Image (tube, helix red, strand yellow):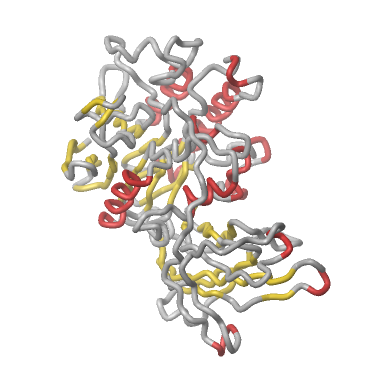
Amino acid sequence: MRKNDAVLTRRGFIAVGGVLAASAVHGDAAVSQGSMASAPRVLDPFLGTQGVPLEVGAPCLQAPGETTMGVSWAVSGLAKGVVEYADNPEMSGAKTVRGGGYGLVPIDVNALQVRLTGLRRATKYWYRTITTPFTDYSNIYDAKLGEPIVSSVHSFTTLGAAAKTHFCVINDTHAQFKPFQMAVRKVKKLSPSVCIWNGDATNTTQQKKTAVEIFLNPPVEDRDWSADVPVFFESGNHDFRGSWISKKEEVVLPRDPSERRGDQWDLKWNFALRLGEMALVGLDTGEDKPDAHPKWFGLANFEPYRRAQAKWLEEQFARPEIASARHKVVFCHIPLYADPASADYPHDGVKVDPHDFAFWSRECSGLWGPILEKAGVTLVVCGHTHRFRFDPPSPGRRWAQVVGGGPELGVSSGKPDASRFPTVVEGLVEGGKLRVVVHDVFNNRVVLDKYL
């Protein structure tokens, strides 16, 4: 919800956990991941690395599923990549998976992506990335490859009804890397089964390299935070802003296409999956202004998008594995509820507002709220307002709502404001009840610890 959009500049990244490739598997002289240097770049990066050493970022787990897992990672030049995975840490009998679908395997100068499929539910796997630079691609029939670069071995566990019931949520990080480091350090310490990045990861994205820095290679100490914790991404309003951002799936993998029917193809970020005793459901509230707002220049088409999600949502709650979950938890960026007595209430995203942004979404509430009520949802987790808030259930609304904080570190509009701090929202089931813990990662305290 930040008003001042900014285009980030590219920062160098340090490769994490590089190891020498075994010559018996990958050739005689594999090289290790090195530190990111400010070496000069060739004019056209798609002609190959041209003698400039390739630098490779840590792998990032994305779009987790019960039988699928996405892996994305940053590169500094033209390269191809594969993922090796196995059911043991020694990587014995590892399988190799290439990116893309049928036909041509994708190569890129910024980011590589591989989706693992056919996995077993609630099962731990170990994996590593193998990245090979194209040193010269000026002639397609005489391209030259460099030595493969092999990452450290990391692990993940697929979702499912037998998986550990534990999630974390971060939100409104806005490419502010100091509070982002605080949040991801807490996520690493809590070691949840999954993390939901609940919108406004970006500000305004004009270039792919900006998205690569934010999602794959942040300039923070714990830049490998998502190498072992799978991440769901739900868009916030800022994640639709900028001339490049419509291509964000080149950096952040959407859901596996097999989860969608043809008429739901564009609902590529929504998810509904079991995680132990919970069902996790992700929705996209879209922008915080009406589609007809003049600032959109006719580019917005969010109102039909929200209606399509309502139909999808009803279908997901009817699935036996979702309906039978003890607790159903919904994640979306813009809050679905504001107390009618609060100052937020008039600013609902339906009309052109004097504040020029919504504090909550009346449209989403009207479309989705009755479905959530009928399904017996326990909790809705949101962001957007940059201020922590908890709304307990009330008559006519059986679900609670928790709103995470933003990137401000005790300051608002240049003045001290103790209500402004970044959060990590944690959820787990204990004794059949959903326990919600909200961590203020700036002041190192717990601001909510409640059973629902």
Left or right: residue 212 compared with residue 141: left
Asked if residue 391 lies left or right of residue 134, the reply is left
Q: Position of residue 381 (x, y in %)?
A: 35, 34
> What residue sits 43% from the left and 42% below the top?
175
* In the displayed structure image, the side of residue 315 where residue 172 appears, left or right: left
Residue 309 or 21: which is nearer the viewer? Answer: 21
Q: Position of residue 286 (x, y in %)?
A: 51, 28
- In the rendered view, would you say 447 is above or below 141? above
Q: Is residue 181 above or below residue 145?
A: above
Query: x, y (%) of residue 271?
Result: 49, 42
In percent of width and height, residue 60 lies at 47, 58
Can the viewer see residue 437? no
Quadrant (top left/top right/bottom left/bottom right) for the C terminus? top left
Q: Is residue 62 above or below residue 394?
A: below
| Residue closer to the observer: 175 or 82 | 175
Quarter placement of the N terminus: top left
Residue nearest the observer in this picture, 430 or 72:
72
Instruction: Identify which residue is drawn at 52% across, 50% down.
Output: 10
Residue in the image at 70% along x and 63% along y:
105
Please name whichever residue, 178 or 67, is drawn nearer the observer in this view of the structure: 178
Number of numbered discs visible in the structure rendering? 0
Identify the image quadrant of residue 146.
Answer: bottom right
